[in-house]
C-alpha cells in the first residue's frame, strides 16, 4: 500500500508534488511537470496549528556547527539575488492544418461581404470560441482573406501546430509567447509563437488546445506528433536554486549561513519554477547566503540541537 493510499481520502486536503509545490490537485496521480507521484496533504486543523507554531519557534534561531565539519561534508552556498526568470512549459502536440478554423474564417469573411450585422457577430463569436485573438480578427476584417496555411501547407506560408497545455498551466499562456517546436526525438525544429488559445478544457486530458504558429513550412505530415516548449517570462524576481530548498508537503525550508559555522533554518514561500530556480515570495532577502549542498546533514544537526520541533519531515 502506498503512502497516499494509507491516508483516508476524507482527511486529504489536496495532492501536491514534492518538487513543484505550486501544483495542487484534487486527486492522486503524477505531477504534470516532472511526472513524480503526487503526495497527499492532510486537512487536520490541530496539526496545522501545531505546525505553524513550530515554524514560529525556529524562525531566526541559529544552530552552531563546527566549521571543520561543514568543510568535511562539502557545504556550499549561493547568494540570494534577483534574476530574470523564464519558466518553460514542455508539452505535447501535433501538426495541425485546422480546417474548422479555416472554414470559420471564410464564414466570417463572407458575412462581412454580405454586410449582415447579426451574421458578422455570430461568426466573430465562433472565431473567439475557437481561440482567435482580437488582433487576428481585426486583420481578417482588414484583409478579407482566410489564412490558407490553416487548411494546407503552402510554400512561403507559416505552419501551424496544436499544443495541449494542462489546465493548471493555461493561466500563464499568453498570445505571442515564444514556442520552441521539437520532434519526438528531442531535436529542435523551429521557433514559433502562440497564435491562439482555446476556451475549452478537454475532460479526458484536462488540457486546453493552444495554436502555435511557425514562420515557415516544416514539411511534416498532418497529425505528426511533436513537443512544444513554451517560454514564459516571470520578470526580475528574488530567487534561489531548487537544490537549496528542502521540500515537503507542508512547507519549504532553506538554511541561511549567518556567519562561519552558524546557520539559521528559514521557512520560505516559493512561486513558479524557472529552470533550476524558484522565485521566492517571502522568507529571504537579497544578498543572504543559502546552503545548496550539505543542507541535509545540517538539517539533521539542527533537529538534534534545536529539537524535533525544528520541523517535521
Image (cartoon, grey):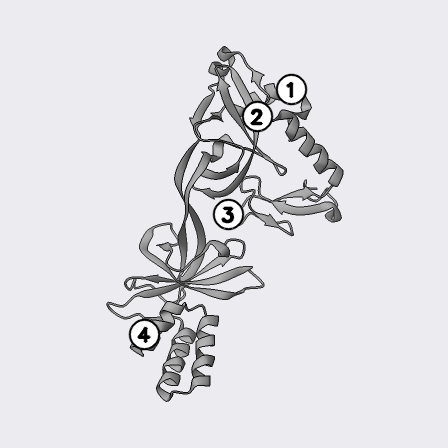
Q: Secondary structure at mark 1?
A: helix
Residue on which disc 2 sits: 265
Going 53% across and 24% down the picture, which residue do you hit? 295
Q: Comparing marks 4 and 1, which lies closer to the viewer?
A: 1
Residues marked 3 and 1 touching at CB (< 8 Å): no
Q: CA distance from mark 2 to mark 4?
A: 60 Å
Mark 2 or mark 4: which comes first in sequence? Answer: 4
Where's the C terminus, which quadrant? top right
Q: Secondary structure at mark 3?
A: loop
- Where is residue 66 shown, x and y percent of the image? 53, 11
Residue 107 in picture, x, y percent from top left: 40, 82
Tags 3 and 2 touching, CB below 8 Å:
no
Quadrant of residue 264 in the image? top right
Q: Which residue lies under the disc numbered 4? A: 148
Q: Closer to the N terminus: mark 2 or mark 1?
A: 2
Q: Residue at x 57, y 19 (%)?
A: 62
Residue 297 seen:
no
Name the residue at 63% across, 37% down: 250
The 10 Å Cα crowd at callout 1, few under 14, some 14 to 19, many 20 or more, is some
Q: Quadrant of residue 16?
A: top right
Single out the mark in the foreground, 3 or 1.
1
3 or 1: tag closer to the N-terminus: 3
Q: Which residue is mark 3?
A: 33
- CB within 8 Å, label 2 to label 1: yes
Question: Is residue 52 or residue 29 the one in the foreground?
Answer: 52
Label 2, secondary structure: give it: strand
Q: CA distance from mark 4 to mark 3?
A: 35 Å
- Of tags 2 and 4, the one toward the viewer is 2
- Which residue does the numbered mark 1 point to in the structure image? 306
Distance between the alpha carbons at the discs numbered 3 and 1? 35 Å
Amino acid at each position: 500500500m502506498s503512502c497516499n493510499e494509507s491516508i483516508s481520502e476524507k482527511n486529504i486536503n489536496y495532492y501536491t508534488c514534492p518538487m513543484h509545490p505550486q501544483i495542487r490537485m484534487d486527486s492522486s496521480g503524477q505531477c504534470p511537470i516532472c511526472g513524480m507521484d503526487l503526495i497527499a496533504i492532510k486537512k487536520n486543523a490541530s496539526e496545522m496549528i501545531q505546525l505553524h507554531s513550530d515554524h514560529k519557534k525556529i524562525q531566526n534561531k541559529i544552530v552552531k556547527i563546527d566549521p571543520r565539519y561543514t568543510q568535511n561534508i562539502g557545504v556550499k552556498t549561493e547568494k540570494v539575488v534577483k534574476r530574470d526568470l523564464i519558466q518553460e512549459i514542455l508539452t505535447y502536440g501535433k501538426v495541425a492544418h485546422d480546417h474548422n478554423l479555416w472554414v470559420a474564417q471564410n464564414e466570417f469573411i463572407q458575412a462581412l461581404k454580405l454586410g449582415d450585422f447579426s451574421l458578422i457577430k455570430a461568426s466573430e463569436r465562433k472565431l473567439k470560441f475557437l481561440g482567435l485573438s482580437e488582433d487576428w480578427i481585426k486583420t481578417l476584417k482588414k484583409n478579407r482573406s482566410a489564412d490558407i496555411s490553416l487548411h494546407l501547407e503552402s510554400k512561403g506560408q507559416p505552419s501551424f501546430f496544436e499544443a495541449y497545455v494542462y489546465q493548471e498551466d493555461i493561466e500563464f499562456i499568453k498570445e505571442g509567447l515564444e514556442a520552441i517546436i521539437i520532434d519526438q526525438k528531442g531535436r529542435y525544429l523551429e521557433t514559433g509563437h502562440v497564435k491562439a488559445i482555446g476556451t475549452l478544457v478537454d475532460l479526458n486530458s484536462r488540457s486546453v488546445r493552444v495554436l502555435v504558429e511557425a514562420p515557415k513550412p516544416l514539411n511534416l505530415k498532418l497529425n505528426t506528433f511533436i513537443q512544444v516548449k513554451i517560454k514564459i517570462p516571470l520578470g526580475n524576481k528574488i530567487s534561489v536554486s531548487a537544490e537549496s530548498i528542502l521540500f515537503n508537503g507542508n512547507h519549504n525550508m532553506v538554511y541561511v549561513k549567518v556567519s562561519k559555522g552558524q546557520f539559521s533554518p528559514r521557512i520560505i514561500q516559493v512561486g513558479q519554477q524557472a529552470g533550476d530556480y524558484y522565485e521566492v515570495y517571502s522568507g529571504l532577502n537579497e544578498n543572504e547566503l543559502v546552503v545548496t549542498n550539505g543542507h541535509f546533514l545540517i538539517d539533521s544537526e539542527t533537529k538534534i540541537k534545536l529539537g524535533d520541533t525544528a520541523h517535521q519531515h
